[in-house]
Amino acid sequence: MMGVTWFLLLSIIKRLTNLRVALLVPCVISLWLIYGQVQTINALFYGDNVRYKMDQQLASMIMDDVIRKFDGMPEIPIFFLGEYHHPPNPAVIPVEILGGSFWNWDDGCNGRISAFLRVEGYNIIHPSLDKQEMELKYRDLMTIWPAYGSIMETEHGIMIRLS
């Protein structure tokens, strides 16, 4: 499609001007479009890297709280209630997967959060619990992280309320 479009554009310009201008105009337009595309892709990937660094920092803060509260990494499942939304950052362009945080994408998916924490080096045990059931059971008993009472040990494991 793009080839046909450029061929037609070149044919029209060639009829209206000389051959040198007919070749120069599409080249200039192509370079301008490529430059714009490269700028957009760079902004997306830079923003996603910034968001990833924010996710790493949040993981470190939450897991430091857990390790401090339980005197080391607990050997029981850790479950996250709700989702965490980072403060707005102008560098992060939220589009689909790029810009999406591990802490709120898929409605705060515990599997995704647990996998992210394991990749970051935290040896946590992923629980096989129903999120809605756990939220109904513990949501009102806990405060929102980082407040005191946002991390609680239960018969099902450790609950951390993010929202």
Image (cartoon, helix red, strand yellow):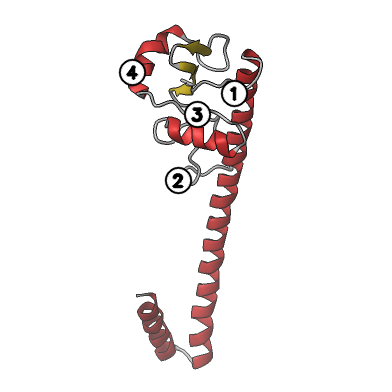
**Residue, disc 2:** 97
Q: In the image, 108: left or right of 146?
A: left
The residue positioned 66% from the left and 15% from the top of the image is: 71
Amino acid at the residue labelled 2: Ile
Disc nearer the start of the sequence (1/2)? 1
Amino acid at the residue labelled 3: His
Disc nearer the start of the sequence (4/3)? 3
Mark linked to residue 85? 3
Q: In this view of the protein, which residue sits in the foreground, 95 or 162?
A: 162
Q: In the image, 73: left or right of 102?
A: right
Q: Position of residue 113 (x, y in %)?
A: 49, 33
**Compared to 50, does 73 lie above or below?**
above
Front tag of 4 and 3: 4
Q: Position of residue 14 (x, y in %)?
A: 43, 89
Amino acid at the residue labelled 1: Ile
Disc nearer the start of the sequence (2/3)? 3
Q: Position of residue 56 (x, y in %)?
A: 61, 35
Mark linked to residue 62? 1
Q: In this view of the protein, which residue sits in the foreground, 120 or 123?
A: 123
Front tag of 2 and 4: 4
Question: From mark 4 to mark 1, how far is it between C-alphas?
Answer: 23 Å
Question: From mark 4 to mark 3, how far is it between C-alphas?
Answer: 22 Å
